[in-house]
Amino acid sequence: MKKLIQDFELVKYEELNCEHFVLDIKANEPLPEILPGQFVNVRVDNNNSVFLRRPLSIHNVDYDRNVIQLFVKRIGEGTKSLGKLKIGDKLSVVYPLGNSYSIPKNAKTLLIGGGCGVAPLLYLSKFLHEAGNEVTTILGVRSSYDAVGLKAYEPYGRILVTTEDGSQGEKGYPTQHSVLENESFDYSFTCGPEPMMKAVAAYSESKGISCEVSLENTMACGFGACLCCVTDTKKGNKCVCTEGPVFNIKDLKW
Amino acid sequence: MVNLEVKLKDLVLKNPVMTASGTFGFGEEFADFIDLSDLGGIIVKGTTRHHREGNPYPRMAETPSGMLNAVGLQNKGVENFCQDIYPRIKDYQTNVMVNVSGSVIEDYVETAAMINELEHIPGIELNISCPNVKEGGMAFGTSCASAEEVVRAVRQVYKKHLMVKLSPNVTDIASIAKAVEGQGADSVSLINTLLGMAIDAETRKPLLSTVTGGLSGPCVKPVALRMVWQVAQAVKIPVVGLGGIMNAKDAIEFILAGATAIQIGTANFIDPQVSVKIVEGIKEYMIRHQVSDINDLIGAINLK
Ligand SMILES: Cc1cc2nc3c(=O)[nH]c(=O)nc-3n(C[C@H](O)[C@H](O)[C@H](O)COP(=O)(O)OP(=O)(O)OC[C@H]3O[C@@H](n4cnc5c(N)ncnc54)[C@H](O)[C@@H]3O)c2cc1C
Ligand SMILES: Cc1cc2nc3c(=O)[nH]c(=O)nc-3n(C[C@H](O)[C@H](O)[C@H](O)COP(=O)(O)O)c2cc1C
Ligand code: FES
């Protein structure tokens, strides 16, 4: 897939809570094909102390309006500055980057996300739904305050929540949800903090189902030029930005 | 029309803009963004005699105006380069040079000898910043004696353009430059990365798996510029300047300090089109200053 560098314009900003926000960014020209699991690398121009671009997953795509949606969690200077952009501000974007989740057909699929790891799962659930799969998404958060943006998933399947404090959905971690015991799935997909992804991987292995995880290694370039983002796989070091970010757990040394 | 052509001894560059090793992949990674034939040259990834896995993750830490890396020369070895990569890149309409690294002299020599056979590779850049395993891990490039030794050995087997890339982690870089000139280097390039380190105060852990790593980006530019100026005065062979160049203005500064050509490194990560923008920017500068030949700018710093 050809990679592009383009200026996008911020057309919508939605504050979900004090930590998370969603950016709608619009290109001047028709978007190229974008696959679920791919990411963009954005330049943070409104803060001179942020030197490198910041990688962000593609949360959703609207081809009719040339709009890409990003779901961002405030972590440090870079993501905080992105949250201060104003409507009409320009954003330099390198995209579409990375590989993608594989899309089975007519299967029972399980998506588990935690924290900002939910970002790529919305666009993935859309693809899974369109391919005739049954989609169950479990979102694991600390409390009901963090259970944001759920409505967007509803058109594509069932959305379940776990909270650590029990304030919404089931109490506990997403891998402790009762649906994992009561039902069976053919494929699992996950993105989020590494301990959570490792728990999803362990569950999937115990059930003998395929599991794909999306890694968030720190990156300098995002397109395979620097070799900074590697993860240790059974076939040696692989770049997360070009050979990932999506990996099947059978290839990782987890 | 302005003339952008420069010569590194017999090697003709259509313009002085090259890309730095380890920041430009094999060029292929940039083919979606730019036309590689617009560049004076590209220097591909550090290549060693044998396959190297490189260092464990994490290998990168952002710093104010720059970054630290500890990639550790991950590459598939020179045989893989000759068989798999060379056929894919040999027809680029620019000078494709290979950055050669090693930890013992025999490895440098064997690697250089194999690349000498590749018709479309007009030169190598010898990276003498690598730790010299036999001398207890001190980089070849940090003493005149070991720098001379490796250049002398490679010169015997390598017949085309031999550029030697100098380490800035020394007290007197000009003396190292003179030493490699004395052993038959055709040009010198500088600077490689500066040794640095970063710690996460919250976790008390180093940010790189190797604790220390190489600093690059605009934060190193003043140091690089100073070293290019000192070396350009000390040697007669052409000097290739790099370290923190982000735009045409930075590039011109290096040329004024005495660089015949320049390389773009870390800036490629932030803007994959920056190298060709710098070619255009140099042209604009020359037109604005009514300079018709880039060669008139080399070393043209006004000290009066
Ligand atoms: C392929 C990919 C996709 C991503 N998708 C999203 C997304 O959709 N939404 C989103 O909000 N974030 C996403 N991230 C993470 C995001 O890139 C980081 O949160 C961001 O780079 C942090 O930048 P900063 O300047 O805000 O923080 P920094 O100042 O760079 O860092 C602040 C602190 O955050 C930690 N940190 C830095 N980078 C990361 C990281 N990659 N992951 C976790 N912690 C980190 C650092 O250790 C540091 O202590 C993704 C990362 C990758 C590699
Ligand atoms: C990620 C990375 C990898 C590098 N790998 C090499 C290498 O293999 N060989 C080498 O001689 N220099 C290597 N360098 C050094 C650069 O070529 C260059 O000398 C240095 O980064 C300074 O220039 P800059 O500030 O423009 O990046 C590397 C630099 C970076 C950032
Ligand atoms: S971030 Fe540069 S190679 Fe992956």
Image: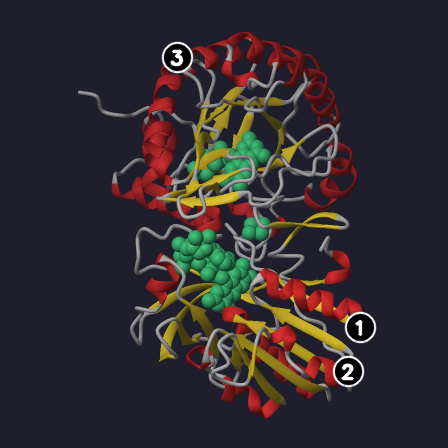
Taking the image as shown, residue A23 lies to the left or right of residue B83, namely left
| Mark 2 surroundings within 10 Å by alpha-carbon count, few (fewer than 14), some (14 through 19), many (20 or more) | few
Residue B195's label in the rendered image is none
The residue labelled by disc 3 is B234
SS type, badge 3? helix
From where the camera sits, is residue B109 visible?
yes
Q: Chain of mark 2?
A: A
Dividing the image into 4 quarters, which one contains the N terminus of chain A?
Answer: bottom right
The amino acid pointed to by label 3 is Ala
The relative height of residue A111 versus residue B40 in the rendered view (above or below) is below
Q: Residue at x 52, y 53 (%)?
A: A218
Q: Residue at x 43, y 40 (%)?
A: B199
Q: Furthest residue to the bottom?
A: A155
Comparing A239 with B207, the one in front is B207
Q: Amino acid at mark 2?
A: Ser
Residue B264 seen = no
Q: As drawn, which residue projects farthest toward the left?
A: B304
> Residue drawn at (64%, 14%), measured in percent from left and top?
B155
State if disc 2 and disc 1 touch (CB < 8 Å): yes
Q: CA distance from mark 3 to mark 2?
A: 74 Å
Label 1 vs label 2: CA separation?
Answer: 8 Å
The disc at residue A207 is 1
Instruction: Provide the residue designation for mark 2.
Output: A184
